[in-house]
Image: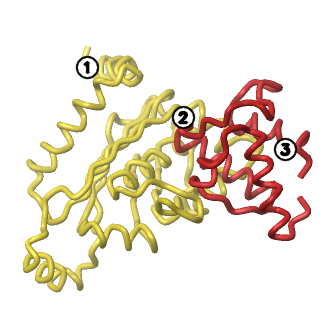
């Protein structure tokens, strides 16, 4: 599927704390008074054309170290790769850590697993090892990502939450982030053009 | 490590025009974005078998400094390059 036909936003939420651990998690965090609604917020924006060269070009050095085999197995072109990277980066920013390959500072790229299927379209997120440990450290219980791409730009907004929120509060946090993102001239042109194409004629 | 071989690969990784990157070029790693940094670290791992961190780059002012640092790392780890 061509990236231009993808719906404007793919919204995915995932749970960091396993269901069987929730009661213990709630007890410890509520007792400490440390439970906060939004524990982290991250944004990333990348050029799709850039990823055509570095992720899908002749050298596999970047692709095979930054992306795991499961992630690469479902790509459909550079838009998938760029969107996958923006999700990793946005989540790493929300974790307050940044990305690295093996040794920090930051969490290893492959510890934030993002499966981007542009045919559905659907994004699935799983945190492993250092990323999961970092999420526990910042007391993030669940997360949401908004992913968007067209043929030129991919971007993701990630929100990590310390407790389950109603959808209105999640929308509010994402809407605030969205206003900041739209003010970036690099994305404004692309987004306005995309929104025009969505309007009923 | 053959500097003459590695330098063009570094240029490609940083999406610079061929021949525009010399040993005297400022590394300016603070101006790199995360993709630049990960791309170069991946290149070094692939080509030289060395694992370096983002902090290692901050100690190098020029491309030549980076190459010297990498040669030192190769020597201390026993890599011939």
- In 3D space, how far apart are the residues under numbered discs 3 and 2 (Cα atoms)? 21 Å
- Is residue A77 among what the camera can see? no
Q: Is residue B9 above or below residue A111?
A: above
Q: Secondary structure at mark 2?
A: helix
Q: Residue at x 91, y 39 (%)?
A: B4
Q: Residues within 10 Å of mark 2 (few under 14, many from 20)?
A: few
Chain A palette colour: yellow
Q: Which residue is mark 1?
A: A199
Asked where in the image residue A135 lies, by quadrant, the reply is: bottom left
Q: Residue at x 69, y 62 (%)?
A: B51
Residue B70 in the figure: left or right of residue A130: right
Residue A17 in the figure: left or right of residue A44: left
Q: Which residue is mark 3?
A: B6
Q: Could you say where residue A72 lies in the image, as x and y percent from the top left?
A: 59, 55
Which of the labelled discs sits on residue B70, or is there none? none
Residue B9 in the figure: left or right of residue A55: right
Q: Which residue is mark 2?
A: B31
Q: Residues within 10 Å of mark 3 (few under 14, many from 20)?
A: some
- In 3D space, how far apart are the residues under numbered discs 3 and 1 (Cα atoms)? 50 Å
Chain letter for mark 1: A
Residue A70 in the figure: left or right of residue B2: left
Q: Nearer the viewer, residue B73 or A147?
A: B73
Quarter holding the C terminus of chain B is bottom right
Do the CB atoms of the residues marked 3 and 1 lie less than 8 Å apart?
A: no
**Co-location on one chain, circles 2 and 1:** no
Chain B palette colour: red
Chain letter for mark 3: B
Labels 3, 2: front one: 2
Labels 2, 1: front one: 2
Q: Could you say where residue A95 lies in the image, as x and y percent from the top left?
A: 34, 58
Q: Nearer the viewer, residue A188 or B20?
A: B20
């Amino acid at each position: 599927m061509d990236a231009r036909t993808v719906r404007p936003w793919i919204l995915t939420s995932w749970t960091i704390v396993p269901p069987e651990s929730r009661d213990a998690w709630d007890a410890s965090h509520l007792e400490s008074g440390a439970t906060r609604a939004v524990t982290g917020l991250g944004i990333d924006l990348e050029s799709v054309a850039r990823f055509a060269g570095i992720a899908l070009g002749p050298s596999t050095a970047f692709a095979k170290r930054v992306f795991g085999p499961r992630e690469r197995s479902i790509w459909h072109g550079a838009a998938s790769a760029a969107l996958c990277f923006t999700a990793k980066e946005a989540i790493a920013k929300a974790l307050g850590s940044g990305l690295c390959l093996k040794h920090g500072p930051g969490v290893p790229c492959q510890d934030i697993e993002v499966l981007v299927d542009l045919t559905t379209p659907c994004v699935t997120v799983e945190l492993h090892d250092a990323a999961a440990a970092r999420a526990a450290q910042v007391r993030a219980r669940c997360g949401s990502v908004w992913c968007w791409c067209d043929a030129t730009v991919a971007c993701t907004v990630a929100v990590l939450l310390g407790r389950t929120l109603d959808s209105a509060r999640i929308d509010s946090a994402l809407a605030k982030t969205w206003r900041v993102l739209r003010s970036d001239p690099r994305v404004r042109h692309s987004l306005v053009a995309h929104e025009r194409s969505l309007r009923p004629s | 490590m053959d500097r003459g071989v590695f330098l063009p690969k570094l240029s490609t990784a940083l999406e610079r025009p061929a021949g525009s990157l010399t040993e005297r070029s400022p590394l300016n790693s603070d101006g790199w974005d995360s993709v630049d940094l990960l791309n170069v670290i991946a290149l070094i791992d692939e080509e030289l078998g060395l694992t370096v961190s983002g902090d290692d780059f901050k100690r190098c002012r020029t491309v030549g400094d980076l190459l010297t640092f990498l040669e030192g790392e190769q020597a201390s780890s026993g890599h011939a390059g």
